[in-house]
Structure formats: C-alpha cells, structure tokens
Image (spheres, helix red, strand yellow):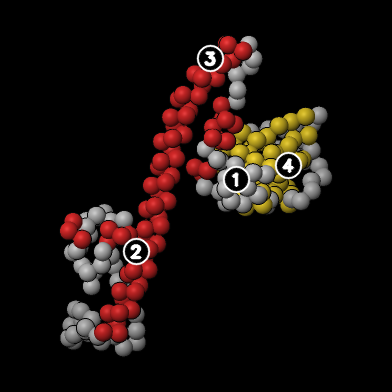
Amino acid sequence: MIKNINWRNYGLDQPGGSGIPNGPAVIMVHVASTNVPFTSESKDAVANIPEIESEIELAIREAARDLKSYLNKRRSMQQRREKQDKLATILPEMAEKLAEVTGRPALDIDDSIARIMNNVLVERTVESETATLSVENNTDTNADAEITAIVAEDPGEVTDATVLDMDEEYYIKWSPTVGSGETATLEYGTDADTEIVVEGIDEQKLTVQS
C-alpha cells in the first residue's frame, strides 16, 4: 500500500517513483476498534480486509497532503529568510552611499526591508506622551493580528482594546484586521518603554519596530 503511493507528489524522495520513500519520515498507522480482525491469536498483524486497507490508504494520503503543505511552507520561508538576509547585507551600504550623495539622513533600513519583503510592519512612535502603534500590511491578504503592548505605566483610556493590570504591568491587547495595502493606527496614553508582542502572523512575514 505505502509502496504504491507516489511520494514524490508529496515532497518526499522516492527513487524510481515506487517503494518506501527516503527519510527522514516515519509512517505510523493505528487501527482502533472493539473487534480488530487480527491474522492470528498473537495479534501480530491486522487481517487483509479491503475495507480496512482502503480506509488506511485514505488516511495516509490525507496525512501526506498535510505533509506536502508543511514542506512547501517551510521551503517558502527558507527562501524568504535567504532573500531577507541578502537585503540586510546590501541595503545598509546603499543607504549610506545615498545619504552621502544627497546629504540627507540615511533611510530606515528595517522599514524598507519590510516593504520590499511584503511584511506586516508594526512600528511604535511617541509624541506628546502618546504612543502610536502603526500596523502597515504590505502582504496581499488581510492581516488578522493579536497585538499586545506591555507597559509599566497606566496607559489611560484606550479604545478598541482590552487592558489588564498585572502586578504593576499593563497589558493592552488589540485584535485588528488590516486589509492588504492598508494601515491601522493604535494609540495609548503613555510614552513608557513598551514590549510589543504580535501573534497570528508568521514570524518571517513580520517586522516589529519598537
């Protein structure tokens, strides 16, 4: 059964297109029933019953599709990391040279990388004792983020957020949905140092400037 599946379609190496795929991979099947039909009293193997074999194959193929999705995502994230690492090496030198030629301050490299990589950019700015979190969505889909700002001072009145007082630390939590190409603005009333925690967005697709 396992040997007859074309595992190359699911991202595993299978020389010749048949047989047991090369690892690293483990294929484990568990059959649960009140009356499992074994081949002998020693219960070493399940009997060759077509209905059971069919259900096992369907379950294995379903797990294989999940494996393929995982491998594709991991490969995509690896390519993003490599591209971002190259940009992080090249852009600072370009920004420095551009600043020398134009006489202007150097560009914010992290912001530029976030936009080139189509990341979600979460950036904190402070003005007149009011902190603002700007959530800029440079991806091609909606960003459903869970954003928590942890501060050591009372943040005052905050809209569209949940505020928890935890032993002299305040946890301000927003759950914005930011459309592709859009920016959401979140504010709270203190300029105290802030730790920003973002959930719901892949780490490789997120840039946080605090």
- Badge 3 amino acid: Lys
> What is the CA distance from the residue labelled 1 to the residue labelled 3?
34 Å
* Residue where numbered disc 4 is placed: 185
Q: Is residue 192 visible?
A: yes
Which residue is at 56% across, 41% downward?
Answer: 119
Labels 2 and 3: the sequence-earlier one:
2
In percent of width and height, residue 9 lies at 31, 60
**Numbered label attached to residue 97:** 3
> What is the CA distance from the residue labelled 2 to the residue labelled 4?
42 Å
Position of 84 relative to 78 (above/below): above
Are the residues tagged 1 and 3 within 8 Å (C-beta)? no
- Badge 1 amino acid: Val
Tell me which corner region of the image, top left, top right, bottom left or bottom right, holds residue 129. Answer: top right
* Residue where numbered disc 1 is placed: 198
Which residue is at 23% across, 73% downward?
Answer: 1
Q: Tell me the quadrant of the picture where the C terminus can be found.
A: top right
Labels 4 and 1: the sequence-earlier one:
4
In percent of width and height, residue 147 lies at 65, 47
Labels 4 and 3: the sequence-earlier one:
3
In the visual, does 180 lie left or right of 189? left
Which residue is at 77% across, 40% downward?
Answer: 188
How many neighbours does mark 3 have within 10 angstroms: few (below 14), some (14-19), or many (20 or more)?
few
* Front position among marks 4 and 1: 4
- Badge 4 amino acid: Thr
In the visual, does 4 lie left or right of 82? left
Mark 4 secondary-structure assignment: strand
Are the residues tagged 4 and 1 within 8 Å (C-beta)? no
Labels 1 and 2: the sequence-earlier one:
2
Labels 1 and 3: the sequence-earlier one:
3
